[in-house]
Image: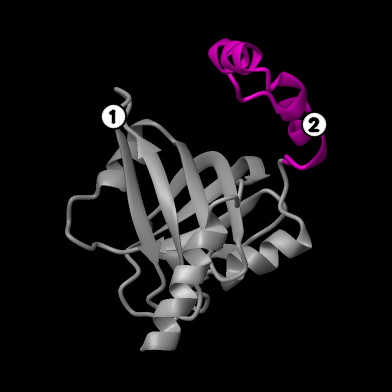
């Protein structure tokens, strides 16, 4: 699971983090969805979805639940989520059509949990194939489903999440 370039490695060496990163990559990085991660993913109400065009222009989208289910884990390597027409720009879908490499940042601010997932995306928009998923996403306007095949999963540093969590709790208390 070596998704990092020589430039990544050079910068780590320059900043003295090579040993630290080796520890993380050998102990907490993985390429499969275990049961606890599946529960976390399937409980999400939103996540951030990053794509890139074939020319390297990047894009990030907020993906939120319209139904009770936002993400459905299919197996140890794959999960799906619905994609809606939204504003009609189709930025992410257009990117995936020419560059399937994607990333997700999944955050639960209240539990101080962040997970980064990198993988390859596939657009499922054939009406006959979409029927397989109609009972998973209980909303009427799913135009397509995005299937992600996982390549790399790592918890994201939650160092600053406690500050955000405290602000959220303060706002909840004041309202």
Q: Pick the residue in front: 115 or 134.
A: 115
The span picked out in magenta is 1-30
Quarter of the view holding residue 63: bottom left
Q: For residue 20: magenta?
A: yes
Q: Quadrant of the C terminus?
A: bottom left
Q: Could you tell me which residue is drawn at 65 percent across and 44 percent down?
A: 153
16 and 152: which is toward the camera = 16
- In percent of width and height, residue 136 lies at 52, 75
Of residues 54 and 154, the one nearer the viewer is 154
Query: Which numbered disc flags the more N-terminal residue, 1 or 2?
Result: 2
Q: Residue at x 74, y 32 (%)?
A: 25
Q: Quadrant of the N terminus?
A: top right
Q: Position of residue 28 (x, y in %)?
A: 77, 42
The image position of residue 168, as x and y in percent, is 45, 73
Give above or below for 5 relative to 46: above
| Location of mark 1 (residue) | 57
């Amino acid at each position: 699971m070596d998704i990092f370039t020589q430039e990544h490695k050079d910068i780590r060496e320059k900043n003295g983090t090579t040993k630290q990163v080796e520890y993380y990559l050998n102990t907490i990085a993985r390429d499969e969805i275990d049961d606890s991660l599946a529960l976390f993913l399937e409980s999400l109400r939103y996540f951030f979805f990053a794509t890139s065009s074939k020319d390297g222009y990047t894009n990030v989208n907020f993906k939120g639940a319209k139904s009770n289910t936002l993400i459905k884990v299919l197996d140890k390597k794959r999960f799906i989520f619905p994609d809606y027409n939204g504003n009609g720009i189709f930025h992410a879908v257009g990117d995936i059509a020419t560059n399937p490499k994607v990333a997700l940042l999944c955050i639960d601010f209240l539990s101080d949990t962040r997970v980064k997932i990198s993988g390859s995306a596939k657009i499922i928009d054939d009406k006959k194939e979409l029927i397989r998923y109609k009972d998973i996403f209980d909303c009427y306007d799913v135009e397509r489903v995005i299937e992600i095949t996982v390549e790399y999963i790592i918890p994201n540093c939650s160092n600053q999440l406690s500050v955000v969590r405290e602000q959220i709790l303060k706002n909840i208390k004041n309202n």
